[in-house]
Amino acid sequence: MYDFSYHRAGSVADASSKLKAAEDGKLVAGGMTLIPTLKQRLAQPSDLIDLGGINDLAGIKADGSGVTIGAMTTHGAVATSKDVKSAIPALAHLAGEIGDPQVRHRGTIGGSIANNDPAADYPAACIGLGATIVTSKREIAADEFFKGLFETALADDEIVTAVRFPKPKRAAYMKFPNPASRYALVGVFVAETGNGMRVAVTGAGQNGVFRVKAMEDALGKSFAADAVANISVPDGDLNSDIHASAEYRAHLITVMAKRAVAAAE
Amino acid sequence: MTATGIGASVKRVEDFRFLTGRGRYTDDIERPNQTYAWILRSPHAHALITSIDTKKAAAAPGVVAVFTGADLEAAGVGGLPCGWQVHSKDGAPMAEPPHPPLAQGKVRHVGDQVAVVVAETREQARDAAELIDVGYEALPPVLDMESALAGKSLVHDGAARNLCYDWHIGDKDAADAAFAKAAHVTAIDIVNNRLIPNAMEPRAAIGDYDTATGEYTLYTTSQNPHVIRLLMGAFVLHIPEHKLRVVAPDVGGGFGSKIYHYAEEAIVTWAAGKLRRPVKWTAERSESFVSDCHGRDHVTRAELAMDKDGRFLGLKVSTKANMGAYLSTFAPCVPTYLYATLLAGVYTTPQIYCQVQAIFTNTVPVDAYRGAGRPEATYLLERLVDRAARETGLDQVDIRRRNFIPNDAFPYQTPVALQYDSGDYGATLDQAMGAALVDGFAKRKAEAGKRGKRRGLGYSTYIEACGIAPSAVVGSLGARAGLFESAEVRVHPTGSVTVFTGSHSHGQGHETTFAQLVSGALGIPMENVDIVHGDTGKIAYGMGTYGSRSLAVGGEAIMRALGRITDKAKKIAAHILEASESDIELKDGQFRVAGTDRALGFAEVALAAYVPHKFPHETLEPGLDETAFYDPANFTFPGGCHICEVEIDPETGEVEVVAFTAVDDVGRVINPMIVEGQVHGGVVQGIGQALLESCIYDEDGQLLTGSCMDYTMPRAANVPNFSVGTHTTLCRHNSLGVKGCGEVGAIGSPPAVINAIVDALWDVGVRDISMPATSQKVWQAIQSARAPMAAE
């Protein structure tokens, strides 16, 4: 990797000011994407600001309405949390399918959503559950947060501090992993929430995570696998690569949606 | 059988150091005053180098030197040699273009070596390499083998039509005549997918030069250090053997990819001499993808002629084999003598004709990869037999049994040069069918059907030639080396033993298996035996480890040396016990005068050998140290039956291998646990090739599967619990009766997997599926098969 200046932030405010001061600074949370990118010399930040020392960014709080997960909480902690398993088992299940054990014990929810990899799992949960992203400056509805490939609504010096997931009536996530990377080739999060049906798809869209309104409408009428079995997403806006054509991805969206509904029923 | 002798499942003695992080790999070695090399590699598949400016790099912090191809050429450094010469049909020798360690004027694949930076740290070397300014003039890349033959763009000016050779074997007229009287001909088009090896340990090399003695030392990740010493010393750097030591310490897997002499080895050795400082290079994983030799990459058309009863009359095969951009060390022999000679398989096919065109392309060089030629032959033959059965309405098992070489036919001369010594194919098939619970398959298939899944069962009855190889035979076929092995058994004065073997262990467990041979033969505990390998400074000579040769050739050399030790020890014992030499017997570590209680322990005889106070020195030399060189009389012929059961989710195309049974005949088994482990590893690689692994270049010659993010290595979750067994017939030409087990898994398994998929989907209308059968490909095949049905 290229040389950079390393800073260990003591607080969110400290991290924010260091980020602002840096010429081309980058926050590092779990580092599961950033560190390999640096090692391959595909990025050359002037400064790295490490959030690992900010203790109050990690942790899970539950109340009757849902769970709030600190930005520095690892996937492993979410996957094994009694609170998450009890309130939103689909979310614990999703976290448990991210990467491999090493990644799950380093990677964080804040890092994942701030990076907004179009094949990451967490964006599907955030959109699928209608989560709220809490930052150093404000609260952002998930629907407004994910803006496209590796793009979010975050301002340059804005830091994700937590994600608040409301408890759904029922929910499930079905992932068809990329056989090599284990990222989602297609992942579908289905939920019946207090504000209606939500179907969020990750891994497939050219602009990252998206909702499937036709499926949401159908589920509103009948929450059953059959309701979505014949709804297909047009393949025009879907990714096509050596692992899956847009046509195959479109097909998998329907299959995974059907299976997610069946699992949530 | 003793607790640690032949047949005992002794736990691998080397595993303690590997599992506790105490192995010593090349990259673990640090030499005083060491520098680090970074290789600048070509970003183009095919381009002229119009200029190289290294000034900025040479002036960068920490840089010791920068070298290009011109520097090596000026210093008289030679090209990397090829160890095997194949001749074309017309008698012309193969095209053998030069392979400079650093490119001269032209780059021929993405990853080709362009320059080397040597610096105080690896990061400094890499930083400086980015400052080298190379002018490239891109040329049209040659990628697909068919269009390569059109010859519009040439990888090497000296290889017209990009053809390395156009070779054949067998009697074409006789094969044509056999086809003329056939009742049925089955044809199949086969692609054997290109694989990227991915040993766990990336390649590494350290060059060192001793200014006091003028001796060079190369530490390298090699499967055969003596071969590297010979090739690099004699052809590339012109260093005589007594001034060049090659050490291959612990090596973390090879699978063939670490057989070859690579440019980096020559570069660091030469640079160490030039700079008078050690130079270390360690590949990053991404470099491994574009610089370790790839495997397989055949495109084949094959036809099988049968009589009305399904008996094979003739086989005709035409193969295009990708050599990549340069000829790697053993590349030419893989698609010829390690492939076409196996096309009889386990069948009595009387006429076989095969032609092979080897073709240069702008891709990473291709050479042997676990199985090397034999998986390609097995895959095409077993897919063809499967198809023939389906076309003629014969049962998968029946068509095989009708054509098996019968037990009373051994030794069996095939029409493609090899003479099989032993085997029992019917019994091996029976045993595998029993273990695979074939009788219950119909029930399992019906049950899966109720869950919306499709089950299939696939067979592969295969043979391979290993125990490589009789030097006289391979010499007549173009090998520029002999393929014997050496062993030295050194008994120390207090009775412990060190064995120096020319075989090299990089995962095979030689330190255990070979020690078992010694323990069994001398009757001493395994703890008293050390196996030393991988150092030309310690071992007399060696051809190394590949082609499942270590036990059948290297082990046999150890047995011969042990025999000489025993003979000498008996002489010593006879002298001390004042008995006749012929009356001395060695049993349980005791030299006893037969029929008496007069005996000496092994350690007592060893001590006497080194304290020879009363020896008659005219007839008995001191010492107990014997060397043997063993050259086998024939190849060995392991074979077996693999049965794969798959379950397919037709909705997604996912294939799950739900059961895999392997019954292999590897000859006598020394350590059943190690054999089982070797079979497991080989089968996992075979399943990887069949379902997951695919090397893909784009139209510009860029490697799209250049990391583990895109190249799918098999994981534990991709494979079931295996059912592994052996059915033994002994090899008839070595004293141990061993055949070899390192490659059987990778050779036998791929067709069993694909045949199982075809079996599962035949009723849907799927007739063929190519490797790797990814979920997308299977889904597409189902869609395509269903489409015409839907239209009807």
Image (tube, grey):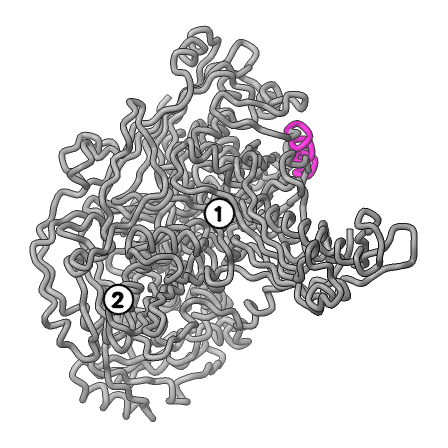
Counting from the top left corner in percent of width and height, residue B391 is at 49, 18
Counting from the top left corner in percent of width and height, residue A60 is at 46, 81
Q: Are marks 1 and 2 in contact (CB under 8 Å)?
A: no
The residue most toward the right is B596
Rounded to the nearest angstrom, the CA distance separating label 1 from label 2 is 29 Å
Q: Residue at x 46, y 47 (%)?
A: B688
Counting from the top left corner in percent of width and height, residue B401 is at 62, 22
Q: Are marks 1 and 2 on the same chain?
A: yes
Q: Residue at x 68, y 67 (%)?
A: B610
Q: Earlier in the sequence, mark 1 or mark 2?
A: 2
Front-lying residue, B165 or B365: B165
Counting from the top left corner in percent of width and height, residue B737 is at 66, 40
Residue matched to label 2: B271
* Visible residue check, residue B647: no
Q: Secondary structure at mark 2?
A: helix
The reply to whether the magenta stretch includes residue B783 is no
Q: Chain of mark 2?
A: B
**Quarter of the picture holding the C terminus of chain B:** top left
Q: In the drawing, what numbered circle is on residue B342?
A: none
In this picture, residue B132 sits left or right of residue B433: left
What are the residue bounds of the magenta stretch? B425-439
Q: Amino acid at mark 2?
A: Ala
Note whether B59 is above or below B100 in the view shown.
below
